[in-house]
Amino acid sequence: MTTEPVAVGKCRVCRQKDTSSVLYACNDCVNRLIRIVREIAVYATLVLPAMVAPMRGQTGRMSPGYGSASPARDDVIAALDPRSLPGDVDEHGDAVTRRPDDAGSWVASIPGRLAYIADAIADERDESRPGGTITADADYIRANAWWLGGQSWIDDAVGDLSEIHRQAQDLAHDKPGKPIAGCLTVTCDGQVFWGGIGKSAQCRACRRTYDGLDLVRLEAAQGVSA
Ligand SMILES: [Zn+2]
Ligand SMILES: [Zn+2]
């Protein structure tokens, strides 16, 4: 007999919607997972590489104070390098998917983090998977999104993917300037804003920070109240 809890009740990801009897996540959260994985692949294969590609005829327009090589975007180059893994494991050997508190800036490999999640799925499913590229890893995760919805660790997976997604958005400066949502702290009526590269989203009033799954829940709460 398994001791797994019966997967009926509130979604583990957003904690707002009900799940079907076979899933730990609601349909909206599984669909969101599929969307953010698709967007991560677009950022990592198209948007971010274009930002660090050598540009012709730009040498006269460099900002003062920068050298001639990829001014100021070493962070993008590092994030796209599968071997860039500062902070990739903690002292227990577990993957670190959140920015360490003591790091002023933290760049982890987007392909590396994506492959890690795809590997975790393949391990759990006890199968080999096509790999080797960002697109293959993303496709594999998306193809197993509904299977993931039936796993008790769906919340961790969505939290990690949300972090990767936000890292890619931060690097591409592709985020809205308006507040994300109202703070979830019951006694606070502040608004939560993006914190910038390597920083958490934060409530301007109470300074509560939002990362990973907290950020997913914040955005889900906004969707419900809108
Ligand atoms: Zn949900
Ligand atoms: Zn607040």
Image (tube, rainbow, N blue to C red):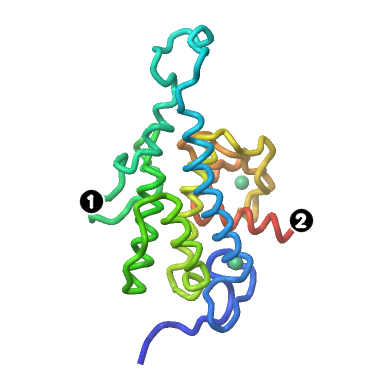
Q: Residues within 10 Å of mark 1 (few under 14, many from 20)?
A: few
Q: Which amino acid type is shown beneath numbered disc 2? A: Ala
* Image quadrant in which you'd find residue 194: top right
**Residue 185, horizontal then vertical, whole percent:** 61, 53
Any mark on residue 21, and which?
A: none
**Quadrant into which the N terminus falls:** bottom left
Of the pair 36 and 136, the residue shown nearer to us? 136
**Residue 211, horizontal then vertical, whole percent:** 50, 49
Q: Which secondary structure, mark 1?
A: loop
Q: Residue at x 31, y 39 (%)?
A: 84
* Image quadrant in which you'd find residue 216: bottom right
**Residue 108, horizontal then vertical, whole percent:** 37, 41
**Residue 100, horizontal then vertical, whole percent:** 36, 43
Quadrant containing ligand 1 reads bottom right
Earlier sequence position, callout 2 versus callout 1: 1
Q: Residue at x 34, y 52 (%)?
A: 132
* Image quadrant in which you'd find residue 10: bottom right
On screen, 223 above or below 108?
below
Q: Residue furthest right?
A: 226
From the image, tell me which residue sits under label 1.
91
From the image, tell me which residue sits under label 2.
226
